[in-house]
Image (tube, rainbow, N blue to C red):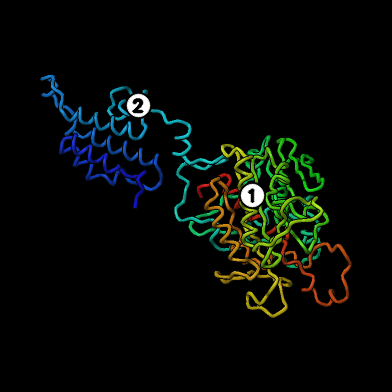
Amino acid sequence: MFTHHHRLHHHHLHFLKKNMPKGLIVDFLQHEDSFCIIEGFSDYRLQLHTRMKQLISSSSFLPTSSMLRKAQISPYFFSLLLLILLVSVLHSQDFLGMIGWQLHLYPAHQAHVPTAVEEKKKNKRLPFDVGDDGQEVRGCDIFSGRWVWDDSTRPLYDESDCPYIPPQLTCRERGRPDQAYLYWRWHPLGCSLPSFNATLMLEALRGKRMMFVGDSLNRGQFTSMICLLHSVAPPNATSLHTSGSLSVFTAKEYNATVEFYWAPFLLESNSDDAIVHRISDRFVREGSINKHGKHWKGVDIMVFNTYLWWMTGLKMKILRGSFDDEVKDIYEASTEEAYMMGLQGMMKWVKMNMDLHRTRVFFVTMSPSHEKSVDWGGETGGNCYNQTTMITDPNYWGSDCRKSIMQVIREAFSEAGVPITVLNITQLSAYRRDAHTSIYKKQWSPLTPEQLANPASYADCVHWCLPGLQDVWNELLFTKLFFPRL
């Protein structure tokens, strides 16, 4: 059912019936559905204008030559003017502009020119959009598809060519013998992903800042991005500097930076130290987004993530007041309620601090881990260790990914009120049990004999090898940044 904003009011129709010639008003009433659309009030006005134009251009409503010779004007003409005036008053249209446009009484160059707001709404272009107007592919969800073998264009860079990959992610250097995980490309159903163009990305970032904010998984995506950009940058023209929670990659010739800021909860927490943050009794401070947010201001492209650190159990501890209070007021909320609080804080910060007419904001959904091989029909006690093939069941969903959290994400962003693009990497990544770092990473403490006897006991089934899966995440980010209508 249409709301009162999308339909002529009953008393308006009554006025028309009483004052307009029968033929004219009947024709309008027969096409009343021309006025009624759901997409929005501005589209309603466009439909109204279109219907008027059809009526006015109809020969039955234009004066004939014999009428002109007699210097008589049809009563329909005055009735039509009355109708236009009525609609103009009711819907705040510029009466003279409408007459000049619809009746063609003036030259074409005096036609109504849409305002900047109308043009933006009409074209629906977001900042950084370089796609053609007709590029939208109906029925294409770039996050639904399949993995296809591609040894001609994969990997997008060599591990040895990127000096910025930390030793926790350099799987080949750390002895991983298999290579098949490097050669899979994501292919959406119904369309294809544009090729990642690092030069286009650098040009778009000229004089700008891009920032990844979140946990170590977002740091992995940040590392993937700077490796992709480094691969096309001139020699000795890039650098990486880390200080505390902030890491800054600089492409000098472009005066561009890509940054990572450590904030695993986005909100202030007792796990905010970028180095020492392995705390079992975690809690966050409510309403504290600005503690970290003050470091994010002035960014042009923002990429948020947060998930894994909230998974402390079924409850999450939340601090009222300050970390400096001698007696801390801490209460518990369900993980879902706490997570929603974090997302709402993020969205409030975006609304208050980012100019959404020139910037873009992204949110990356949960990254799946593969800690339990029983999830995909494997043996009890196994995990991602020694997994060299992906999961082929299209309906696979591991126990590590809480569907209730995905529901919170869905609800939060449906009510966001700000244009944040969600990168739903969860399902497509869930198939990739083969892409984790597993045991092929730097170990920060010596392994015990018991661990060496059972490699699965120390396998990392959370983080991902680079190059690898997270390059695909950045291909999806690239697509939604430059071709948002796909």
- On the image, which quarter does residue 389 sit in? bottom right
Q: Is residue 58 left or right of residue 477?
A: left
Which disc, if any, is residue 38? none
Circle 1 residue: 345
Circle 2 residue: 97
Amino acid type assigned to the residue bearing label 1 in the image:
Gly
Q: Nearer the viewer, mark 2 or mark 1?
A: 1
Above or below residue 150? Residue 325 is above
Query: Looking at the image, can residue 180 be seen?
Result: no
Name the foreground residue: 380 vs 471: 380
Amino acid type assigned to the residue bearing label 2 in the image:
Gly
Mark 2: secondary structure: helix
Point 28% across, 34% down: residue: 53
- Local packing at callout 1 (Cα closer than 10 Å; few below 14, some 14-19, many 20+) is some
Point 36% across, 26% down: residue: 111
Name the foreground residue: 476 vs 259: 259
Point 75% across, 55% down: residue: 159
Whole-percent x and y of residue 212? 69, 48
**Distance Cα–Cα, label 2 vs label 1:** 44 Å
Mark 1: secondary structure: helix
Above or below residue 280? Residue 204 is above
Cβ atoms at labels 2 and 1 below 8 Å apart: no
Query: Looking at the image, can residue 123 be seen?
Result: yes
Whole-percent x and y of residue 327? 79, 55
